[in-house]
Image (cartoon, helix red, strand yellow):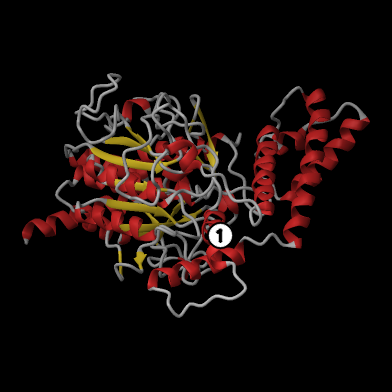
Amino acid sequence: MRRLVMTIFLYTCSQIVWGQDAKFWHWKDLEKDGVHGVSLFKAQQLLTDLKLKPSPVIIAVLDGGIDTAHPQIKPLLWHNPKEIPGNALDDDKNGYIDDLHGWNFLGNAAGENINKASDEKSRIYHRYKDIFKQDQLDSTSWDTTKKANYKIWQQAAAEIIFTEEDAANLSFIKMARNAVIKMGAILIKEMEDSNFSTEKLETYQPIGKITADTKISYLRTMQALGIDRSNGHQSIVEDLNEYISGKEKSSVSIDTPPEDLRKKITHDQYENLNDQFYGNNNITGPNAKHGTHVAGLAAGIVDTLFNQFSFKNPIQIMGLRVVPDGDEYDKDIALGIRYAVNNGAKIINMSFGKSFSPEQPWVDSAIRYAASKDVLIIHSAGNESYDLNVKSVYPNPYSNVFKDKAVNMITVGASSDPLIAESLLTEFSNYGNKIVDLLSPGKKIYSSLPNQQYGFLDGTSMSAPILSHIAALIRAYFPKLSATDVKAILLQSCWKPTDTDLKLNEISAEGGIINAVLSIQNAQLYQKNKSKK
């Protein structure tokens, strides 16, 4: 799933109204701006001074949907050169009708779309429940596949249990949500601001005693829930409702099978990977918040004022809608990767993940297919504070099927800044130097949102496309470098701060934060040395 960071045992992913100076901090430079960004503006100047002519590079954004009408994304969308828009024909004979900017694997020809989906553990549990939930099982005649299915079913069965502690937490959050709504109504009536932030409320001087008492109670509730002070009231309520809805589904998931959305909407034979021509060309879908934010970062949006810069952006964005609100389906991910590769993408950004992957071989095979076609994959590490050295999430660079590690895949954790979160590290990012390669900014990251909006989101989902943008610049300006060359360059281009209590080489393999200037300088050297051979 799109592992956004949310509050209440998660962290908020809502749009934030925040200080102007913090916008786009992730692109800035420590020496010039005093924040631990990636030095993109310095890198752009370096590329301009080199007077190199870039080649267009396509970044495929595998996500939950992209607002193709966003004024800063629309000019950068990939256009399928062999497809005639709007004629309801498969002009390029690739099996996908009118795939002008990409493809939506979560829909059907009638225009219906999967929006919310269950978690993978529920799907696994109920898929094998009738087979394995028996008083006595005789495994002596089981083949390797059935043994593997039983193992993953046991893991799902253990995690699907809704404990008394889970129920108590849910009850608490419901009461808190109801109180927040009631208090909000009182405050909104006097403040005349339906989406006030905690920051604004802190400085507001109430007129009446009821409002004054409500202000104190509201602020205490926000503190108890751990909600960011910058979040708007309406966004907080939406996040609380989403959290409650998800937990309520979890509470009954052991008894209630998830809805078969493949049968209802996509109409594909899910167990057959060769049944791949389903979906529609609506790459926006019903909820494009996450994907639009990711696409803006991958594209390298650096302001909201449409200022004209001398630096020409060589990047094109291809949209693959493969991630619902819930856990993604392995088949859609595998086919999304293959579509991206077959249609010219050189970078694939994957800001999603989950703890179970029953069709992992399909995804592993697609990742290695991308490697064979010189395509680099950037994957977010996730936001559960897991040690990935001991806890697996998927997609994973290691393959139990191929018995190797993908040579074309980089896993990215999230960094921050002391001015933003009092630390260089985020409190949510997964870590582990055997899986996480390097860090990239992921805290209070400003980018595009649907309906011509912009806002801050948190998560390794943001870290990955920042790295994808830098990778794409290298591929655009140094086109002779391969995907594995670019991976090696990026891994060598980390700034390694020493002013942190934690050992960064335990957090990630490279023990540092990606830097765009170092990336371009190393790409220069790499290409120069390569041309001598």
Please tell me which residue is depicted at 47% across the width and 61% down the height of the picture: 393
Q: Amino acid at mark 1?
A: Tyr
Q: Position of residue 186 (x, y in %)?
A: 84, 29
In the image, residue 483 sits, relative to residue 260, either above or below, namely: below
Task: Compare residues 72 and 326 and report the one nearer the observer.
Answer: 326
Task: Compare residues 248 and 319 and report the one nearer the observer.
Answer: 248
Quarter of the image with the C terminus is bottom left
Left or right: residue 429 versus residue 213 is left
Task: Compare residues 178 and 474 and report the one nearer the observer.
Answer: 178
Left or right: residue 497 versus residue 90 is right
Residue under label 1 = 125
Q: Position of residue 475 (x, y in %)?
A: 22, 46
In the image, residue 505 sits, relative to residue 122, either above or below, namely: below
Camera sees residue 505: no
Q: Position of residue 214 (x, y in %)?
A: 86, 36
Q: Residues within 10 Å of mark 1 (few under 14, many from 20)?
A: many
